[in-house]
Amino acid sequence: MHDIRMIREAPDAFDAALKRRGGSAMSSDILAIDTARRAKIQAAEDAKAEQNKASKEVGAAKGRGDEAEFERLRALVAEKKDEVARLNEEAKLEDAKLTDMLARIDNLPADDVPDGTDEDDNVEVNKWGDLPTFSFDPKEHFEIGGVAASMDFETAAKISGSRFVLLKGAVARIHRALAQFMIDTHVDENGLSEVQTPVLVRDEAMYGTDKLPKFGEDSYQTTNGWWLVPTSEVPLTYTVAGDVLEESALPIRMTAHTLCFRSEAGSAGRDTSGMLRQHQFEKVEMVSVTHPDTSDDEQKRMLRCAEDLLERLGIPYRTVILCTGDMGFGAKRTFDIEAWLPGQNAYREISSVSTTGDFQARRMNARFKPADGGKPEFVHTLNGSGLAVGRCLIAVLENGQQEDGSVQLPEALSPYLGGKLTLQADGTLS
């Protein structure tokens, strides 16, 4: 949500920032509604003052026996009462129109975000790891001998339809081990607090975290109105909705491992092979709630938390800062981490780490009380994948594959797999 006062004070700067994101100038439309709303509010206040004045004079007219004046004033009071109600209702409608417009406008990019139109304009800022070499043509994850029998798309389709997978046996255990490794690292070493969240949330939580109204079609809604979370960013971030926190409580750092659900609207024909793009998947999420002065440093810290997981797993990756045309709706700045997938001979996104500034906080009315006793201010919120579990599984399998169909697994998973770090070609662990 945007600050209407900022738009009033710097409309040209607001329009310039929107144009960087590929949008058009909107300040004049916004301010026209805002002006009409404020005019209605002022007119209602003026009418209320006239109503109050007439109300005081009614008694005086009655007292001096001026029946004509008494009737005139009584009629005026009734007229002004109706006028106040009408003007307040009109102001309310203008306010709803303004709120809806502001809620649908993308967040403004940070100054250091590169300009661009799509992913081709993203800028690489880091690269880690040597790409593995193979004496054979590397396969995609679902084609590897030791994986194929335990990654069942046909049975999943029979149960649920396309873009679902049934993981079985050793592959299911590796998937679970990856999630546990991520959570333990975040809690034991990165200072995040683990939270077990609901995966069904209300409209308010989706709205407050900028998923509604613009992206309702990208998520699933139950028949009784709950939404299945597209990511645990939603319940984690919404924990502070409506709160006025003590400054000393910041930063709040949380992590959760949950199921996530996305309709993948508009992705027909993309990544249909394997489990890269699914309707249901698991993700370990990081969310931070911070003081505005520290949010940029917090984003860098969160980014390192995610990158470090891949380094521990020995997965080559690159980090890019997204250009203005490729950022998500609510992001002020986003870094994507892309893991190397030999089977595709490409880097593919495995984590996004974003700061929204106060964009979500305004929607949620999440504030903090400055230690010096000043007026409450909006917090900043940040979110990042740490990591997408299914995509991490793909990266581990493809980078560790052997010519005989087996897979060598990362040493970091040893405590979670009973020391068994080879997925044999027959699908067993040893």
Image (cartoon, grey):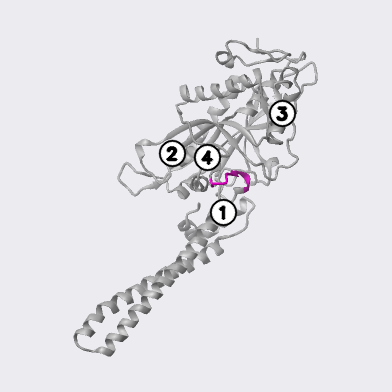
- The residue carrying pointer 4 sits among few (fewer than 14), some (14 to 19) or many (20 or more) residues within 10 Å by Cα, namely some
For disc 3, the marked residue is 155
Q: Earlier in the sequence, mark 3 or mark 2?
A: 3
User: Does residue 261 appear anywhere in the picture?
Assistant: yes
Which numbered tag is attached to residue 212? Answer: none
Q: Give the magenta range.
A: 217-225
Q: Earlier in the sequence, mark 3 or mark 1?
A: 1
* Residue 321 sits above or below residue 324 on the image: above
For disc 4, the marked residue is 200
The quadrant in which residue 328 appears is: top right
Q: Is residue 222 magenta?
A: yes
Q: Is residue 287 magenta?
A: no
Query: Answer yes or no: do the residues labelled 4 and 1 have beta carbons within 8 Å?
Result: no
Q: Earlier in the sequence, mark 3 or mark 4?
A: 3
- Distance between the Cα atoms at labels 1 and 2? 24 Å
- Distance between the Cα atoms at labels 4 and 1? 23 Å
Disc 1 is placed on an element classified as loop
Disc 3 is placed on an element classified as helix
Which residue is nearer to you in this view: 143 or 128? 143
Q: Earlier in the sequence, mark 1 or mark 2?
A: 1
* Residue 43 sits above or below residue 239 on the image: below
Identify the amino acid type marked 1. Answer: Arg
- The residue carrying pointer 1 sits among few (fewer than 14), some (14 to 19) or many (20 or more) residues within 10 Å by Cα, namely some
Disc 4 is placed on an element classified as strand
Q: Residue at x 36, y 48 (%)?
A: 376
Which numbered tag is attached to residue 290? Answer: 2
> Mark 3 or 4, which is nearer the eye?
3
Q: Position of residue 11 (x, y in %)?
A: 52, 59
Identify the amino acid type marked 2. Answer: Thr
> Mark 3 or 1, which is nearer the eye?
3
Identify the amino acid type marked 4. Answer: Leu
